[in-house]
Image: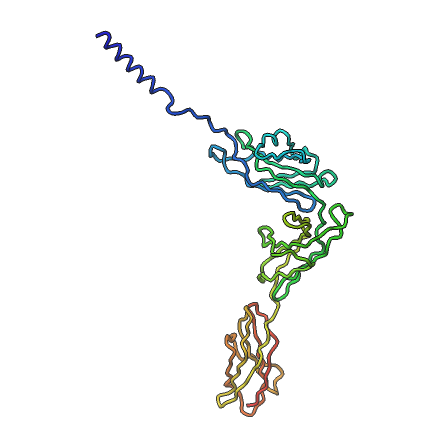
Amino acid sequence: MRRSLSVILCFLLSVIYSGCGRKGVLQEPVPKAPQKVVDLGVIQRGDKLFFSWTNPESYLDGRRIEIVKTEIRGIEDKGTQKSFEPGKSRFSTLSRLLTEMNIGRVEIKDSRAILSLDANKALGRKFIFGLRLRGKKGGWSEFSNLVELTPVLLPLPPGELEAVCFEDRIHLGWKVPDYSTDGKTPATIDGFNVYRSEGSGFQRINQELINSTSYEDRNFSFGQSYQYVVRAVSGAEPEVKESDDSAEVRIVPRDIFPPEPPSEIQAVVSGDGVRLVWLANAENDFDGYRVYRMQESEAEPTLLNSELLRMPVFSDGSVEKNALYVYSITSVDKSGNESQPGKIQVRT
């Protein structure tokens, strides 16, 4: 009996203690660090380097993150270093903060950074850059993808940019820069790019490199505000680099251009009066026609239709017999611009 009680007691104790332990395989906790940046990019424009990236939205464990510090580091590649990918621990050890590299002044804001280069200390040297982030809580992220760039001497921006509106285009013209950013070396220019903004950032609008000092923008709308800048281009693909932006020019094209006057006007006189016909206008913004009539004894013509005619035909039943009339027909566009008149003389 005593032996049976001992067996039962051991069984109960084993059940109790087995329920108190952690179930499954033990796992290491996920470190509280931001997800790393994977799309760091850098370009040179004029005497500046422009860095861009996408900030992560969460920590490694999936919780949302508030970025409180961004750190860009770099190292000069003198040709003796092997590739740092994927061994980024070497980059972390050998690189220095961008602010400590003594190659220019850096400004970091949100997911952008601009490094204004010190030409004497940066041009012609190959650099490797990486980026890491820190959240409000926790440590640093892993380093981003690493990017390489060798700053070169580039042209100054184009000068004297002007924009003039015509009926079917906005004409842009500018002056070729004479020198590079050092102010003394003659500029080497392979072409130009034109950028346009409608209020939300500049986008390049030329499909091919421009080899002249002018450009015709035909994709526009009257009444819309446009801003333009032009950049000088140096180098060939894939090493194309641009100057800094020219001075910005803004234009709001206004439709002050009248349509073509009616042509090939013909008149048919009958007992019912005078019937006029002419060729229809083909302008996209055409709105209608006005018909004026004047007798020999009148000083000014009289408008015969109170509303615009949509079709190129008009019947005048209020004429006198054996009278001489001069009919003037004008075309009008949707902006209210009125053409010169097309005229025909009619004797009833």
Which quarter of the rendered picture does the C terminus lie within? bottom right
Give the side of residue 323 with respect to residue 48, left or right. Answer: left
Give the side of residue 315 with respect to residue 44, left or right. Answer: left
Residue 97: x and y in percent read: 64, 33
Front-lying residue, 148 or 60: 148
Which quarter of the rendered picture does the N terminus lie within? top left
Q: Residue furthest bottom?
A: 322
Front-lying residue, 282 or 250: 282
Residue at image coords 50%, 29%: 32
Residue 15: x and y in percent read: 30, 18
Residue 221: x and y in percent read: 57, 61
Determine which quarter of the picture holds residue 226: bottom right
Q: In this picture, is 171 found above or below 325?
A: above
Residue 170: x and y in percent read: 63, 62
Q: Residue furthest right?
A: 184
Residue at image coords 66%, 55%: 249
Q: Residue furthest left?
A: 1
Give the side of residue 271 with respect to residue 131, left or right. Answer: left
Give the side of residue 25 with respect to residue 46, left or right. Answer: left
Front-lying residue, 93 or 257: 93
Count of marks placed on residues: 0
Determine which quarter of the picture holds residue 345: bottom right
Q: In this picture, is 289 found above or below 71?
A: below
**Colouring mode (rainbow / by chain / secondary structure / one colour):** rainbow
